[in-house]
Image (tube, coloured by chain):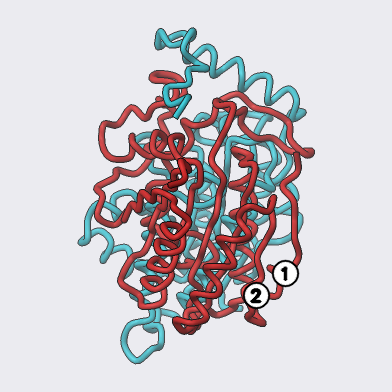
Chain colours: A cyan, B red
Amino acid sequence: MRVPRSALLLVGSPKAGRSASGALGEYLLDRLAHRGLTTEMMSVSKAYKSPAEAEALCAAVDAADLVVLASPLYVDSLPAPVMKMLEIVAEHRRQGDGAAPAAAHGTPALVAIVQSGFPEADHNAVALAICRAFACAAGLDWRGGLAMGGGGMTDGRPLGELGGMMRQRMRALDLAAAALAAGQAVPDEAVTLMSKLPIPAVLYRLMGDLGWRRQARSNGARRRLRARPFAGG
Amino acid sequence: MSSRRVLLLDGRRDDDATLVSVSAALDDGLRACGLAVDHWLLRDEAIAPCAGCFGCWVKTPGVCVNRDAGRAVAERIMKSDLLIFLTPVTFGGYSSELKKALDHIIPILLPHFRAVDGGTRHRLRYAEYPDLLAVGVLSDAAADPALEAETFRELVARNALNFRPEHWAAGVVPSEAGPLEIGVIVSGLLGKVGARGELVSIGHPRNAAFTAPEEVAS
C-alpha cells in the first residue's frame, strides 16, 4: 500500500460547536501530523449548506492521500448531511470517462470513525458498512473503520483532557495512526481497543438516564419528559 | 374504506424510472386495498438537518425544537398505522433525502436507555407504533449488490428494533426490473408486511439473503 503524505479530516457532526466525532478525528489527525503528514480539516455540515463548499470538499478529497471521516451515528446510520456528502463525492468521482479523477499521488484512501451514545460499539456496524461501500463506489482504497460506543462520555472535549477514561481509545487511535501513516489498514488491536467501554454498560446506562433527567429539570421539562404529544392518533 | 392510514416517506433523489414505477405500484396497491396514503415526497421539503441538540428529549419532550417540516415527521409517523420507506439503496443505506426526515424520528422514543437482547436501545415513548415496510431500489451499478442488499436489510432490522413495530418487512428491487416484475414484487411486499418480521424474497438471485424469515426479537 502507498504511504500517504497528506490527510484530510471530514467532521460529520451536525453540531455547531464541539463534538465527540470532531474530538476523535482531531486526535487521529494530530497523530498523523506527528508522523509527518500534512493535514487539513473540513466540516461536512458546511458543505451540506453550500454548493461551493461541497465542490471544495470534492476537490480536497481528490487531492488527499488519506481521508478520515469522523461521524456520529444517527438512527443506526450516518446523519443526512454525511449521506449527502457521500452521494456528491461518489458522483463527482464517477464523472468524466467513468473513471475516478487521479489524485495527487494516486488513489486516495478512506478510514472511518463512527461513534454513538450507546454503550455498545456494535451499533455503528451498519454505518461503517455504508462507508466501506461508499469507498468502493467512489474509487477510494478502504483502510478500515473504528467504532466507538459511549460517545457521550467525551462531551466533545479533546481526548487528552479526559484522562484515564479515554486511555484505551487514545491507544487505539495511536495504533491506527501508526498503521495508516505506513500505508496500512487499521489493525485489529485498534478496532478492539476502540470498542471497549471504560465502565460497565449498566453503570453507563444509569449515568445516562440521570443526565437526561438533570437536563430536563434544568429546562423546566422534568415533568413532561415522558409526554406523548401524538398519542391516540 | 379501511381506517388504516399509511405514511409513505419517499426518499427518491431523482426520477429514476424503476423507483418511479415502484412508487406508483405501491400507491396503486395500497389504494386498491382501500388504504389512505399520505405520500410525502421528501426532496420537495426544506428540512434542516437534525442538529443533535436533544431538545426534542429535554426541552420540548416528544417534539423537535426546530419549527420546519422536520417537526412534522414524528407527528405524521405516530398518526399512521403503516410506515413505508421508499429509497434508492445508497451504499447499503437510505438516501440523504429519506435520511433528512428519519434523523428527526428520535422524539418518538424516550431518551432513557433499556437493555434489549444484550444491547442497549432507547425506551419507548408510546404504547403503540406503526408497522414498518422498507423498500429499496438497488442500482445494477452497485459494486457489490449482495452486500449492499444485506446492509440495507440489517439497517431496517435495527430501525425496527428501535420502536418495535408489531409487523415489519424489508425488500430490495433490482433497478433492472421491468414493470411486470415490479408489480409482482410490490404485491408480494404488501402481502408480506402483515407477517411478523418476515423478510421478503423478490425473485432475484442476488437477493438470496432475503429468503429467510427472521423475527424481531420481543
Residue drawn at 64 percent across, 70 percent down: A184
A95 and B107: which one is in front?
B107
Marked residue chain, label 2:
B
Residue drawn at 47 percent across, 45 percent down: B2
Do callouts 1 and 2 mark residues in contact (Cβ within 8 Å)?
yes
Q: Position of residue B28 (x, y in %)?
A: 40, 64
Question: Which secondary structure lies at badge 2?
Answer: helix
Q: Position of residue B143 (x, y in %)?
A: 55, 80
Judged from this view, the residue extending furthest toward the bottom is A97
Amino acid on which the number 1 mark rests in the picture: Thr
Q: Position of residue B207 (x, y in %)?
A: 65, 75
Q: How far apart are marks 1 and 2 (CA)?
A: 8 Å
Amino acid on which the number 2 mark rests in the picture: Asn
Tell me the residue that label 1 is attached to: B211
Q: Is residue A38 visible?
A: no
Same chain for the residues at labels 1 and 2, yes or no? Answer: yes
In the rendered structure, find residue A184 and report the number of the disc placed on it. Answer: none
Residue drawn at 69 percent across, 35 percent down: B120
Query: How many numbered badges does the structure rendering display?
Result: 2
**Taking B40 as reference, is B119 above or below it?**
above
**Taking A8 as reference, is A229 above or below it?**
above
**Taking A1 as reference, is A57 above or below it?**
above
Query: For residue B76, which quarter of the picture?
Result: top left
The residue carrying pointer 1 sits among few (fewer than 14), some (14 to 19) or many (20 or more) residues within 10 Å by Cα, namely few
Q: In this view, does A180 lie to the left or right of B62?
A: right
A75 and A137: which one is in front?
A75
In the rendered structure, find residue B207 and report the number of the disc placed on it. Answer: 2
Question: Which secondary structure lies at badge 1?
Answer: loop
